[in-house]
Image: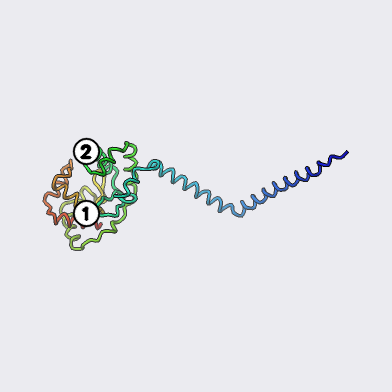
Amino acid sequence: MMNTTTKPRNRGKRKFILSGWLLLAVVVIAGIVYGPELYGLLRVGMQVKQIAADDTRAGGTWPRPSEACIGCHGYGGNAGSQIYPHLAGQPEAYLKKQLVAFASGERSDPNMTPMAVSMSPHELDSLVTIFSKTAPLPNATFQADPARVARGEVLLKASNCAACHGQQLEGKDLYPRLAGQGHDYLVDQLTRFKSGARRDASGAMPAVVSALSQQDIEDLAQFIASR
């Protein structure tokens, strides 16, 4: 007696095999047609993943200490206000020295001191790495007075600021980048050096500003902020 279920089963099996071959053919054709585009997307995906991994190694996992700095120092350390310093492009040695000074109490600030004290050595190093490797942007929000800028340039050359801060005021080693700093921040810090409220172990800054009038400080800040 013939098994009536054999033919339907065989037909089902053949359909399954044909469907599999058809699917394989579609995949092969799609690979031929869209292969270069798919490979390009795969490469982009791999590059994005690598960039993210490198970024995490440099700045640490989220949330990062640098995110707490945006409110004052702007994205990447490029402050939009004249009140706060630009951290982008500052020398690593200088940034680390200042953070350590805030943590030790050598420098005092209601915002910076608590933050520096709370950071681990790894977080501090990560913060320094992020800002030192970020490209500094021009101080576009500052409107300079040409006459005061000219007077400030004369004062800067007379004070030989380039000897420590570089020919373009770009900063080096333990000396900060001055070019493009916030005008109000510069005036405040120069005034603090003059009064002794901010100390400088080398004695260089007090010696430079001691002979400057408040008008001189304003002119000098105009020139530096406009660089």
Vertical order, 162 against 121 (above or below): below
Residue at figure coordinates x 32%, y 49% from the top left: 70
Is the N terminus in the top left, top right, bottom left or bottom right quadrant?
top right
Q: Secondary structure at mark 2?
A: loop
Q: Nearer the viewer, residue 172 or 97?
A: 97
Residue at figure coordinates x 83%, y 42% from the top left: 4
Residue under pointer 2? 105
Q: What's the distance in space between the residues labelled 2 and 1, CA to CA?
A: 24 Å
**Apparent side of residue 33 relative to residue 57 in the rendered image (left or right):** right
> At which x and y percent is residue 84?
26, 51
Which of the 4 quarters of the picture holds residue 116?
A: top left
What's under tag 2, amino acid-wise?
A: Gly
Q: Nearer the viewer, residue 149 or 196?
A: 196
Residue under pointer 1? 184
For label 1, count other residues whose C-alpha is less than 10 Å away and answer few (under 14), some (14-19) or many (20+): some
What's under tag 1, amino acid-wise?
A: Asp
Vertical order, 77 against 5 (above or below): below
For label 2, count other residues whose C-alpha is less than 10 Å away and answer few (under 14), some (14-19) or many (20+): few
Q: Secondary structure at mark 1?
A: helix
Q: Nearer the viewer, residue 201 or 169?
A: 201
> At which x and y percent is residue 32?
62, 53
Label number found at residue 104: none
> At which x and y percent is residue 10?
78, 43
Instruction: Residue 142: tell me if it is visible.
Output: yes
